[in-house]
Image (cartoon, coloured by chain):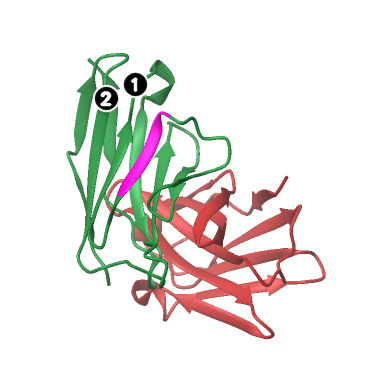
Chain colours: A green, B red
Amino acid sequence: DIVMTQSPDSLAVSLGERATINCKSSQSVLCNSNNQNCLAWYQQKPGQPPKLLVYLASSRGSGVPDRFSGSGSGTDFTLTIGSLQAEDVAVYYCQQYYSTPHTFGGGTEVGIK
Amino acid sequence: QVQLQQSGPGLVKPSQTLSLTCAISGDSVSSNNAAWNWIRQSPSRGLEWLGRTYYRSKWYNDYAVSVRSRITINPDTSKNQFSLQLNSVTPEDTAVYYCARDQGALNVWGQGTTVTVSS
């Protein structure tokens, strides 16, 4: 199985400041000849299912604000929240869908400083 | 707009079978560009992908090794839904269970069902 490791476990950022979350996979998740990576990011708020933010490592999901951006390739990936808003308080997860089982990272809790 | 509506009991006795259903609206379980997944979440195990079913000229299933001997995911084309059966449950199977559509990433999720395994 591909192991997904996120860091940090939690972070607190001032409103309007940048938040950066890292995700490392135990093997490459490069999934096609177009240099795209089978890596997704999700946001989960209490009592809700996860919501897709980013797919193919850097493509934003439907309706996702442009302050959310994904980057990285191979085994190292980053989710950046460009200007943290109060509604962004949540837990964020990365997931690889390169091979089954489609494994998730342990999550990063983002709060307000 | 695609929606997934989960149903099933919230309490299951140890050694019995956990059964959940996910009804699809706005898409088809037989779609050639989607797969239909079950995921669970617990404090001890985090988000755990359990398996999926999908149609590509015939039906396929993928299952997580951790539950492969106990799990069945079945499509029901007549009702446009899919189901999860997990046999011989123990308290370790207590979790919130989600169904979800994947077109690569998981882009539509059900509302979640809290399942407790207890006598």
* Residue occupying image coordinates x 48% and y 73%: B87
Please provide the residue range marked out in magenta. Answer: A67-71
Residue A10 horizontal side relative to residue B103, left or right: left
Residue A36 horizontal side relative to residue B75, left or right: left
Image quadrant in which the N terminus of chain B is located:
top right
* Residue occupying image coordinates x 44% and y 69%: B15
Judging by the rendered image, the residue that carries numbered circle 2 is A18
**From where the camera sits, is residue B119 visible?**
no
Label 1: chain letter: A
Instruction: Look at the magenta stretch and give its main secondary structure.
Output: strand
Which kind of residue does numbered mark 1 sit on?
Ser
**Label drawn at residue A106:** none
Q: Position of residue B75 (x, y in %)?
A: 68, 72
Q: Is residue B97 above or below residue A86?
A: below
* Residue occupying image coordinates x 31% and y 35%: A80
Judging by the rendered image, the residue that carries numbered circle 1 is A83
| Spatial CA span between label 2 and label 1 | 5 Å
- The stretch drawn in magenta includes residue A68: yes
